Image: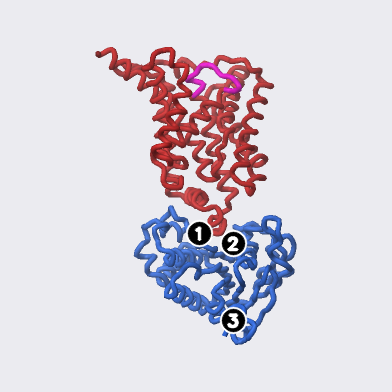
Chain colours: A blue, B red
Amino acid sequence: MLSIKNLNVKYDNIRVVHDVSLNIENGELIALIGANGAGKSTILKTLSGLIRPESGHIFFEGKEITKLPSHEIVEKGIIHVPEGRQIFAKMTIEENLKLGAYQQKDKNLIKEKMELAFDLFPILKQRIRQLAGTLSGGEQQMLAIGRALQGNPKLLLLDEPSMGLSPLMTQQVFDVLTKLKDSGITMLLVEQNAYDALEISDRTYILETGRIIMEGKSSKLIEDPKVKEAYLGGD
Amino acid sequence: MMDALTYFLSQFVNGVKLGSVYAMVAIGYSMVYGILRLINFAHGDIMTVGVYTILVLTTAFGMPLWVTVIISVIIAVFVGLSAERFAYRPLRSAGEETTLVSSLAVSIFLQNLLVMIFSPQRKAFLLSEQLTELHSFGTIRLSTMNIITFITVIIVLLILSHMIKNTRIGMAMRACSDNMNAAKLMGINITSVIVTAFIIGSALAALSGLMLAGEYKTIDPLMGFVPGLKAFCAAVLGGIGSLSGAVLGGFVLGIAEMLFAGLMPTEFTAYRDAFVFALLILVLLIRPNGILGTKDGGRS
């Protein structure tokens, strides 16, 4: 579905992504883990057209999307849930969700997706007229995911959805991701929370200072002694 | 006593007249600022371009005013979009200070271009008798143009507020103003949103140019800069990014300026511009986000 070939990305004139290649098959949940500053977010930003790569190619459903502007990438069905949620704080929950459906034309589909968001996150329905900035961190994350679903994603890019959340809230968010996976949405999940990411995903890529140093089935990696030591806090 | 009251009232009305012109310019300023966080110094000069277009078309070609207004709006939009395309868009990723400096450059460029074409000399700008005809309301006297200006400001405010609140492009504008990156991720083509803001802003600049020139009765190539600055003050005063704030700020500034000019001893009237800017500083010390401003300067 998505394939990244030899991607190099510079950020503030420093190369932060080195020769990264990555493949995602239809229906997979892929985790991309690594320490802070490893280049995970940069890869996602490049995928959604917020940053231009120095070199390399990105293909989605067989077509090159490397140089497309963000709004055309969204049109293809790649939706990015950014780091730090980036909800529209001064707009209502409802407006945030409507903005998620900005490119959707089919009224029934729009309605259906809004219902989906309310089913997954009932709190959003209760607070529909409230300004998004008044939500708690966890609720904002729910809104950010709910908003992304309005765009009818084929591939969902999730940047650190557990960041700053309580363990309970993190669990809720990961439960929702499992549900979304079951509903057939392909996902690329970037996480610092390596254990949860390995648990939930089919395959995992490990990024270190901008290079992919390991990849494989998550169920294998989670048992790998080196991975255990470096990313799962030893033992 | 009656005389003093009448005098005060007439100064107040003069303030409303001036204020509606400031309000009109300030709305245009605010449209662009709200989205790009760009203080477009060239806004006032786009206004001047509009005025000269009207002058040339009426005097040299004898066109009726309404036709020249339409053409001046088109030319102003063309100039505004060119500035956006060639002076601001290439710098969009470079930060707000850079585009700010670039807008000053565009301003100076337009002023000098107008000086080259039309000479720095002042020119008379006279509206037709129909527009300058005075109507009496008790002791207040207003020209047709004053009434048209005031009504236009209110209508423009209502239409734009409705657009920003209820339409798809309006929601996209608010989204861009709130968080540009997130707006991109929603699939909003931010370039087309920015272009829309410049079209509206420049068209309003042309209209406010006509209003300003009608009030001053003379025009010169540098005439737009100071009213542009004052309109920016008005927008800041009211709460920048907020359209109703811009209009409120425009009226507050216009009224304050005329009351100052009218009520202070004549030796102080030369300082009315200084007074306007002092007022801005004072208001911002008390309410840093302006009268209607929200905490981080968003639209309301």
Q: Is residue A35 left or right of residue A169?
A: right
Looking at the rendered structure, the kind of residue marked 1 is Gln
Q: CA distance from mark 3 to mark 1?
A: 27 Å
Spatial separation of the CA atoms under disc 1 and disc 2: 20 Å
Q: Are marks 3 and 1 in contact (CB under 8 Å)?
A: no
Q: Is residue A223 visible?
A: yes
Image quadrant occupied by the C terminus of chain A: bottom right
Subunit under mark 2: A
Q: Do the residues bearing badges 2 and 3 touch, measured as CB atoms within 8 Å?
A: no
In the displayed structure, would residue A67 be above or below residue B143?
below
- Dot 1 corresponds to which residue? A86
Query: Which corner quadrant holds the N terminus of chain A?
Result: bottom right
Chain identifier of the residue bearing label 1 in the image? A
Front in this rendered view, residue B196 or A217: A217
Q: Amino acid at mark 2?
A: Glu
Give percent across and percent down for residue B270. 47, 16
**Of pointers 3 and 1, the one earlier in the residue sequence:** 1
Kindly identify the amino acid type of the residue bearing the numbered disc 3: Asp
* Residue range highlighted in magenta: B212-222
Residue B55 is inside the magenta segment:
no
From the top left corner, tell me how far across and down residue A103 is, in percent. Answer: 54, 59
Residue A184 vs residue A143, the one in the foreground = A143
Q: Secondary structure at mark 3?
A: loop
What residue lies at 62% left-to-right and 68% top-to-bottom? A40
Q: Evaluate if marks 1 and 2 touch, with contact meaning CB atoms under 8 Å apart.
A: no
| Residue A75, numbered label | 2
Res B267 → quadrant: top left
| Residue ID for mark 3 | A202
Q: Earlier in the sequence, mark 2 or mark 3?
A: 2
Residue drawn at (34%, 64%), measured in percent from left and top?
A: A126
